[in-house]
Image: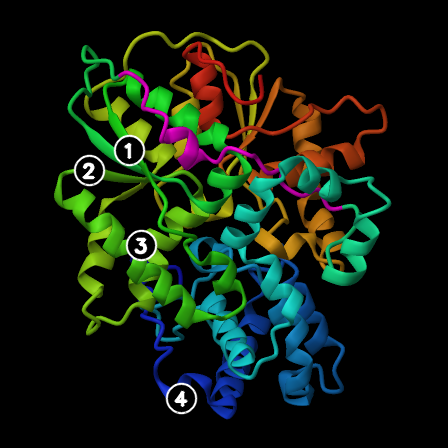
Amino acid sequence: MSEGGLEAPTRHPIDWNDPDFYDEEKLDAELRRVFDICHGCRRCFALCDSFPRLFDLIDESKTGELDSVESADFKPVVDACTLCDMCFMTKCPYVPPHEFNLDFPHLMLRYRAVENKKGAVGLMDRQLTETDRNGRLASTMPGLANWASKTGNGLTRGVLQSVAGVHAEAELPKFYGKTFTARAAGGAPEVNTEAPAHGRKAILYATCFVNYNNPGIGEAARKVLALNGVETEVGYPGCCGMPQLEHGDIARVAANAKRTAAYFAPWIESGHDVIALTPSCALMLKFEWPLIVPEDDPAYQDVTRLSQATRDISEYIVGIAGKEGLAPGLKPLPGGVTLHLACHARAQNLGPKAAEMLRLIPDSEIDVIERCSGHGGSWGIKNENYPVALKVGQPVARRALEQSRAFVASECPLAGKHVVQGMRTLDAEHTVVARSVHPVEIFARAYGFETEED
């Protein structure tokens, strides 16, 4: 493959079971090889804060080259990476099969895996990303949890900032007393047997965020699918492990992958499609898990079957529209939509499916912003990262303000919340919409369904 070639990039398996993976001298040699190439290229300068930090580190060194940079100074570069995959997917001309064989995000993951193995990941960082445990606890007392985590609560947010390292101004997701799985247990929407796609069957992977923090996304998806003839079930064997991946705990991610793949295997065998409701989880199921679970593992077959059966919710609805056709009933939504395309949706390499879906709404005005929101999962709420997260996301917030549409939407609910917070920060007249919504919630509205925000 030549630089600028048109071949599809190749992602190599993550060989985390090999002792060499954790060899610090070999890791340092690979970091230096890759950083030297990045320093000479600089195409990724505007993607995230990792690359400006790297280039400044080298430029300000004694020789202006990597040879005079201490390895201990690499950590801030690694810490700024949110594992969004955008450098690998959209910018880097040296990804495999190019002979330079660059995979910057997975190299940052390797560094974090070494840190994790050494016990260098802090206790509070681990506790913040225990999404299932935290969600279960908060759902038993959502009023108290939401009061304590609300921005502006001087009594609790200062404590959270000093103890847990969560910036006092960072908006945090709400919790609900009745989770999506609990709501789903009450029954499914009636399936429209006259719809062109009638006969499809799908099981919705609830994801930790939708289950505990925004059940309305799942309910909107089920309503839209039922109207379009799709019989749905809801399943949630546990978190996909993306929060643990951010900390380099690859063994735990592999365990989550095996458990979840085994859970969905009978559903796939019975002809059900698997639909992920947030793009980070879809990315894990489709792409990361098959690279993490070794091919000689007995669970690998289930993991690859799940990868092949998984669709993002926007991708699935666009697929229905293209193959069978949608059920009638979509109505225009006045005011238009500003749509942020989440990085983990872009990294799935499936095209702007959320935009395609919303453009199926008659007379729709859709403004698309294809740029990082700056949030990066749990990364953007931390004390040391929150100001950088706002800075990185400021161009998105500014464009959304300028467009002044009735809806602000993102496939990633955390990114959407962060964009709206950025808009409020820039908005001197305080005219910003109250919240962001998921594109499937907008699609449900266009079909006349009430959604959670109502």
Answer whether labels 2 and 4 touch (C-beta < 8 Å).
no
Q: What residue type is labelled 1?
A: Glu
Please say if the residues under marks 3 and 1 sit with CB atoms less than 8 Å apart.
no
Above or below residue 49? Residue 38 is below
Q: Do the residues labelled 2 and 1 touch (CB within 8 Å)?
A: yes
Q: Mark 2 points at which residue?
A: 272
User: Which of the two labelled residues, at mark 4 and mark 1, occupies the earlier sequence position?
Assistant: 4
Q: Which of marks 3 and 1 is nearer the N terminus?
A: 1
| Measured Cα–Cα span from mark 4 to mark 1 | 43 Å
Estimate the spatial distance between the alpha carbons at disc 3 and disc 1, rounded to whole Å: 15 Å
Q: Which of marks 4 and 3 is nearer the N terminus?
A: 4
Q: Is residue 94 above or below residue 193?
A: below
Left or right, residue 315 beside residue 271: right
Residues shaded magenta: 170-190
Q: Residue at x 37, y 20 (%)?
A: 223
First in sequence: mark 2 vs mark 1: 1
The residue sitting at 13% across, 45% down in the picture is 269
Residue 71 visible in this rendered orientation of the protein: yes
Q: How far across and how far down the image is residue 273, in percent?
A: 23, 38
Label 4 vs label 3, nearer the camera: 3
